[in-house]
Image (cartoon, rainbow, N blue to C red):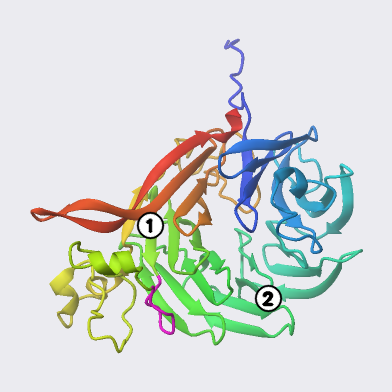
Amino acid sequence: MNTRPVIDELHGPVALSASFNSDVSCFSVGTETGFCVFNSEPCQLQVSRLLNAGIGIVEMARNPHRTTDQMSGMAEMLGNYNYLALVGGGRDPRWPQTKVILWDDAKKKDAATFEHKTAVLRVRLTRTHIVVALQNSVHLYMFSDPPRRVGLFETADNHLGLCCLGHKLLAFPGRSPGQVQLVELQTMNVGIIPAHASALRALDISQDETLLATASETGTLIRVFSSANCAKLAELRRGVDPAFVFSIAISPDSNTLAMTSDKSTLHVFDLTQLPGRPLPSLSPAKSANSSHSRRPRSQSPQVNSPAADDEPAPKKWGFFSKVPFLPRIFSDTYSFSSAHFDMGDEGTPAGSSLPYLPALGSLPTRPMKGILGWKDNNTILLLGTGKDARWERFRIGERLVMQGQEEVMKRQIWKDGWKRYLDS
């Protein structure tokens, strides 16, 4: 007879979910006992709320009447003018997972409740709208008192609760796998983009809301579209073998795109040569030194330019990219740099589950990893959940690398720091 006590695999805190706010100044984390809010850089715990039950989704919103200066501090952001959207989660959910609670952190109580017939997979908030994603529908609410629903949209199976909410646009899966529905919030006009042949895995809208980036469950290609006319602007290749894409994110200036996958790799792509986008200008100092240092051209799609010295961006396969009739992988656009990020060892064998219940909208066999946020145009932050919940920082810049027999300056990405944020 086996009389040994059962080992508690959940000893210690577990992050059920994590998400950045709109400007990546902070991030929120749902746990088995409540939720926490951390400053993004440096990574520091700012607020911890004990609710004695699990919170699977935490999403932050700001008051529409506050200025940017008023919102600069964490104490202010979680003061009298801030709301959070909470959804129950974990082994002992605080609320049914069919409910979204609009939480007034100043009063430490719920301000409104949104009830649905099926489980809530994701929530997105801005200062004017609230979006709730279910498996087969997306609900749009006005951020008013009381909140009122202004839109209901059907979708294909959306197990991850994909949706992106800006101040002018809302994007989410269409009624057929691989499609994207793009909604103008002011007019409620809906555009349909046939983005991929297989189901969507990730979405992102640029900060200026001019670009939409998508990835499918195949995980080999990222496509970039214009939000103005739904035209495809670029096709970027992560690799040849399939991968599970965790996250994609466009930089604040819309010049760079980052993506993470279960290959434990962070890729960064150049978007400066998208059609209709101005090329970045060199500073006088760089222009003067341009003849003394070699800089690689962008690996973005080629565009015609009247400048005589603008050359097409080099391809990964060099000469072979120009040989006709070769497979397209030789001529595709690849990332200009990549770096390893830490996924931990919490993945489970096929057919088994984690020893705790991750947030709805995530995989049952692996906690959420590789959640992207751009702190600025040259700094990327990554979050992971689970027991080994990590914050990682990556920098983008020019570094000396060996090319043949000489050193040249090339744009690179590298890890600049990391921390287990639940140890704070």
Q: Secondary structure at mark 1?
A: strand
Looking at numbered disc 1 in the image, what kind of residue is underneath it?
A: His
Disc number for residue 168: 2
Q: Residue at x 46, y 52 (%)?
A: 379
Res 306 quadrant in image: bottom left
Disc number for residue 74: none
Q: Residue at x 11, y 54 (%)?
A: 406
Identify the residue under disc 1. 267
Cα distance between the residues tagged 1 and 2: 28 Å
Q: Residues within 10 Å of mark 1 (few under 14, many from 20)?
A: many
- Magenta extent: 271-280
Which of the two residues, 195 or 285, is positioned nearer the viewer here?
A: 285
Looking at numbered disc 2 in the image, what kind of residue is underneath it?
A: Lys
Which of the two residues, 41 or 143, is positioned nearer the viewer here?
A: 41
Mark 1 or mark 2, whichever is nearer to me: 2
30 with respect to 279 (left or right): right
Res 54 quadrant in image: top right
Locate residue 218, reporting x and y percent.
42, 64
Locate residue 121, reporting x and y percent.
68, 56
Magenta stretch mostly in which secondary structure?
loop
Q: Could you tell me if residue 147 is visible in this image?
A: yes
Q: Residue furthest left?
A: 405
